[in-house]
Amino acid sequence: MAEDKPLTIWIVSGEESGDQLGAKLMRSLKARFGGERLRFGGVGGHAMGKEGLKSLFPLEEIAVMGFSAVIARLPSILKRIRFTADAAVAANPDMLIIIDSPDFTHRVAKAVRQRAPQIPIIDYVSPSVWAWRPGRASKMRAYVDHLLALLPFEPAAHRRLGGPPTTYVGHPLIERLAEIRPAPSERGSADPGPIELLVLPGSRRLEVSRLMEPFGEALTLLRKRSPRPFEVTIPAVPHLAQEIRKRAESWSVKPRIVEGEAAKWAAFRKADMALAASGTVTLELGLSGVPMVVAYRVSKIEEVLKYLIKAPSIVLTNLVLGENVIPELIQWDCTPEKLVDALLPLLSDSPERRKQIEAFSKLDEIMKIGNEDPSERAARIVEEVLTCRGKA
């Protein structure tokens, strides 16, 4: 393709986190190819919209999480899958990039590959094939030409499982270490004041509804048993802040609730320890050097699925480290008494606390990718795939 001929790249995301990844990738692609040469299409949210994507429909129409929520919206989601695939085939872009949300994006990719096999397809963010349904990896080879992984152990997992060619491009959090990590004056065990305890009940409504009660009861017990006073901060995502405030009204330990990303990172930099829902936040805490206890509850239907899980931990930081240094209290183990038993050692300079901090010091080396940012490395792989296919 002549260098001055426009490149059309379709990007299909399925939720907010994918929209953020997509926006960063779009910026890096424009820097690599020249913004005047690129044409974007697909599905995204506000962040991708600011970079020039006119989404086929609002991202909120498909950004649903949880088994019951997906079932309730299934007819609408299936309709959007067909609509997106039809539009992609009609546009015949030089590349299709799908981002996360595999229940939506992979179905789009399969339909596009079946009807328009000439379109190269890149998947940005691996499904959790290393945790459950490992057979998905080999099936992806039929419709994914290259996989961009956020976690350092994923390329080896896909090689083992027969998945598509995979490159570790780095997690976007490693671009934000200066925001996440404290200055010497922001955190320290020598501080005679109260311990700063972060409570993170999740970023989804169902998580909050299931965890706020046991978390609040655990704090009541912890105050009775703690040898030191502590203060609680909850960094709340804006769309759940009001619900978190309402649920926290019944707590005997009154938290400080903060909103917005800047306030969240400020709380991380001051924190001495955390009680958190399982999720990406555990990697954020690990990179910030905050010892933690992780808990999670799911519905009875989802509980049955735990018997299909193959991973040695549900805690992302444990998986990246390759060792289970962070205690995890799941489902029926997520009780106030057990949460307090796990939290108490973190209140002092205990072996449990030191073990976590020592393990977290290894994360930089494990997750490093060199001098590129993750989005720059992802854009470079996109260019390489386009070149191999004679499209760049």
Image: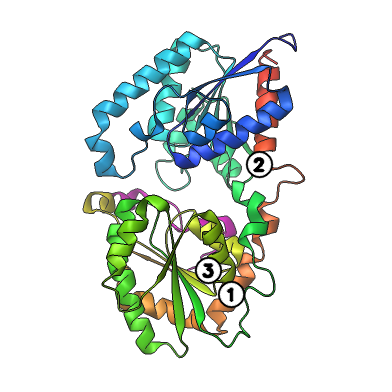
Q: Which mark is residue 355?
A: 1
Point out the tag, 1 or 3, that comes first from the N-terminus.
3
Q: Position of residue 258 (x, y in %)?
A: 45, 63
Give the CA distance from mark 1 to mark 2.
29 Å
Tell me, yes or no, whether the highlighted magenta stretch contains residue 303. Answer: no
Amino acid, disc 2: Pro
On screen, 163 above or below 373? above
Name the image colouring. rainbow
On screen, 14 above or below 360? above
Magenta span: 305-327
Q: Position of residue 225 (x, y in %)?
A: 38, 88
What kind of element bears circle 1? helix
* Residue at point 47%, 88% (across, down): 228
Q: Residues within 10 Å of mark 2 (few under 14, many from 20)?
A: many
Question: Which residue is outermost to the bottom?
Answer: 227
Q: Evaluate if marks 3 and 2 touch, with contact meaning CB atoms under 8 Å apart.
A: no
* Residue at point 33%, 39% (across, down): 64
Q: Which mark is residue 374?
A: 2
* Residue indicated by mark 3: 325
On screen, 388 above or below 266? above
Q: Nearer the viewer, residue 308 or 348?
A: 348
Amino acid, disc 3: Val
Q: Residues within 10 Å of mark 3 (few under 14, many from 20)?
A: many
Give the CA distance from mark 1 to mark 3.
7 Å
Give the CA distance from mark 3 to mark 2.
26 Å
